[in-house]
Amino acid sequence: MPPSLFLEQILNGVQFGLMLFLLAAGLTLVFGIMDMINLAHGSLYMIGAYLTATFVGLTGVFWLGVLLAVVGTALIGMLLEFSILRQLYKRDHLSQVLATFALILIINEVVRIIWGSQPLLLSAPEGLSGPIEILPGLNYSAFRLTIIAVGLVVAVGLFLLVNNTRVGMWLRAGASNREMAQAMGVPIKPLFTLLFGVGAALCAIAGAFLGPILAVQVGMGESILILAFVVIVIGGIGSIKGALVGALLVGIVDTAGRAFLPLLLSQVASPEVASNLGPALASILIYLLMAVVLFFKPQGLFPART
Amino acid sequence: MRYGPILLLLGLLLAFPPIASATGLEFYTGLLTKLMIFALAAGSLNLILGYGGMVSFGHAAYFGVGAYTAAILAREGVSSAWVIWPVALALSGLLAFLIGAVCLRTRGVYFIMITLAFAQMIYFLVVSFKQYGGEDGLRARRPDFGLFELSDTTLYYLTLAVLAAVLYGLYRLVNSRFGRVLQAIRENESRTAAIGYPVYRFQLVAFVIAGVLAGLAGVLMAHYTEYASPNLLAWQQSGHLMMMVILGGVGQFWGGVLGAATLLLVEEILQDLTLYWQLGVGLILLLVVLFAPRGLAGLLRRRAG
Amino acid sequence: MSLLVIEHLTKQFGGLLAVNDCNLSVEVGEIHALIGPNGAGKTTLINQISGAQRPTKGRIRFDGHEITHLPQHQRVRLGLARTFQITNLFRSYTVLENLELAVQARSGSSFRFWSPVKREKALREEAEQIAEMLGLTPRNHTPAAQLSHGEQRQLEVGLALACKPKLLLLDEPMAGMGPEESGQMVELIDRLSQSVTILLVEHDMDAVFRLARRISVLVYGQVIASGPPEAIRANPEVHKAYLGDDPGGQHP
């Protein structure tokens, strides 16, 4: 296998992992702080992608479209929290799963009503559509590189926010011990609404940048949502660091597994077996990873609660 | 249990097919078959979720594996139901045993997520086998029972008989020693362990029973549609089954049946009315969760009491 | 003869030594009290004896069996039952239903799926006897959640008692009780001690000194003294660590 192909797949894995991290970060904080399972988190990602496609179409400027979409999705996220999700914090996990599952159905249909059932076209900005040579002999998509850069910038920003600001301190306190945070006088209700807004904005960024690579269509939120859950369970619920490590792990294992596992198998097994088993194994690799992690560390790699 | 209404319902269901075919409403015989199959699947989930307090988000795995086993065996030339049924039930039971043995070591959110992860594994594993249809699913002729031919009508009666037998069995089970312990674990796990019950073993047995019954529903589903669809295995299907249980009433004996019947009927009606029927389903479900947390059976009971 | 022998028992949570090389033995027929300041590791010790937690190091022997690695339900079968410091009942079940569950656990297999458990007269009758002994008969059909605090604490003991133990582990049975309720509990424990060995964790020193035949003092996860009440009361180390530096003070 040529090393350049290997490097390219690893970069793809990192790029996907960083976008997963944007989804997982919001999810893990909501999960860790409010002990709330929000299946509708993936719907915000979908809304982000649709809004981006719409605003880019309207304004003709990719970055402006993204900005508008991020703001719009954040507002929608806060509205959801304020109107519905807030009722669910005190309920059991079963009710949360069901209510947010219902939200998925509702949002999917609303999106279908507004935008129709056909996938939307969202293309990468023109200046970034070609490949660039990052190493001698290795061409890599400029847009994917941009995604990695955006992902890193947002990740660093998030870490600064969580570790160096007052709001971040509240968030960390809430994630490790909610009663304590309340007792310390942390303004829980507005904090939660704000948190949902931030989570939604992160979803929108992921949706805006994955949209041109994957497809902008109804149902796009669900498949990635489950990956995001795998990420936070591997990383440890409530831990931002865990979300980052888990996301990169899942991104790289998934991408590399799909690229290399069939190749590897064809070395040791007959082509027929390899072509059948390869994709099957590759697609379950991350779930296997999660089961193994949970078996040895039932609280994930970086448990936030003590 | 009051037997009057049950016998009345049973009588109506027994008399339904001939009346339907006399009045040209055969469609509804099929619909009722589907309702009963989902009632069976939801009932099995209600055993672990409602009575056992185990929020499994991967119940579609056993449902789908039952269906796929039936379809794959048929594709491979096995025509006798007397082979297909035991193999399908044994496989879904074995799967539930393996998955349950791992998952039941975790609690709370982790249990929900790991059951989901295992179900996803099964889903991707099944759709990756191209010779069995991959994402298109697998057509499967109905099997041979020897005693009778499996027409739409006999399938209806077979499903009715299976459902009635399973419900009676579940009724005995939840009122037996085992059922009492299972519910005690849901009420207070640490105390149940402290008075000397091996909690894990009880939960695992219940998990396997529920898996086998879901597999049974899957087999019937494959016979009903003459087709095994990957949708039966998808995580949305697990959500769908959970919706039925919560709609009907978690841990209420008739919860699974009531929920399956109501949800499927509502879906059927909404599909006739609008293209965007899932919007209606979502809204109804959201309202039920927010305002009637004990489900329809809970509402009925409150009315009656 | 020793019923329970604990040797070098250690429990570590992360960097914290909750129980540190602890040695303790309980003789057949005695009421053995375990006292110590908050955070001394008393409940952690009870959790390990009952099997709810596994020790990091050390051994536990009970009635001639090595039980260090036995699961909780097998320990109960050997005759080891516990109560909880924070009341831990089946709250929506009635008094009788609570007790029946415990009786059922030791009378035959519970992997029976068919016959209705409500028709098992023997379970019901035994539960009624235990309720009578606890003085809860008038409350037989009241859900546990609706009992008074004192009654809940009695049912808490009753659930352990229904396991027919040889050794009863009582984790602060008087917690949160007023004087009158405490008096009843002391009476109950005194009566029980005629038929069962008791390891009593308690903060109420009046009760401890009235009931205990022997007392062990746990400080920082270690037993620093063990002996008859008079010896413990006179032990200067115990005073320094726990009873307050005032020999012959407020405690009788």
Image (cartoon, grey):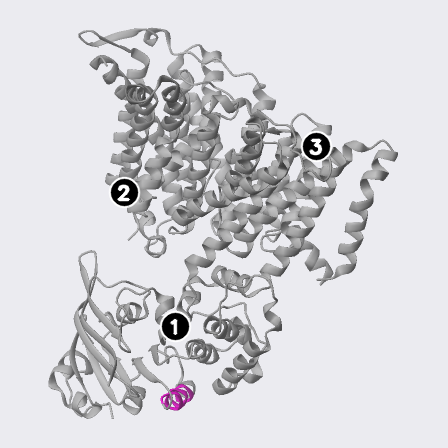
**Measured from the top left, where is residue C6 in percent x and y?**
21, 74
Q: In which quarter of the image is the C terminus of chain B?
A: bottom right
Q: Which residue is denoted by mark 2 in the rendering?
A: A301
**Measured from the top left, where is residue B59 in percent x and y?**
52, 42
Magenta stretch mostly in which secondary structure?
helix
For badge 2, the amino acid type reads: Leu
Residue B99 appears in the figure: yes
Mark 1, chain letter? C
Q: Which residue is denoted by mark 1 in the rendering?
A: C77
Q: Nearer the viewer, mark 1 or mark 2?
A: 1
Residue C45 falls in which quadrant of the image?
bottom left
What are the residue bounds of the magenta stretch?
A: C183-193
Mark 2, chain letter? A
Please tell me if label 2 and label 3 are on a single chain.
no
For badge 3, the amino acid type reads: Leu
Q: Nearer the viewer, residue B104 or A275?
A: A275
Q: Does the magenta stretch include residue A192?
A: no
Mark 3, chain letter? B
Q: Residue B270 carries which label?
A: 3
SS of the residue under disc 2:
loop
For badge 1, the amino acid type reads: Arg
Q: With A236 as the anchor, is C152 left or right in this view?
A: right
Q: Is residue C186 magenta?
A: yes
**Measured from the top left, where is residue B173 in percent x and y?**
59, 59
Q: Is residue A234 above or below residue B175?
A: above
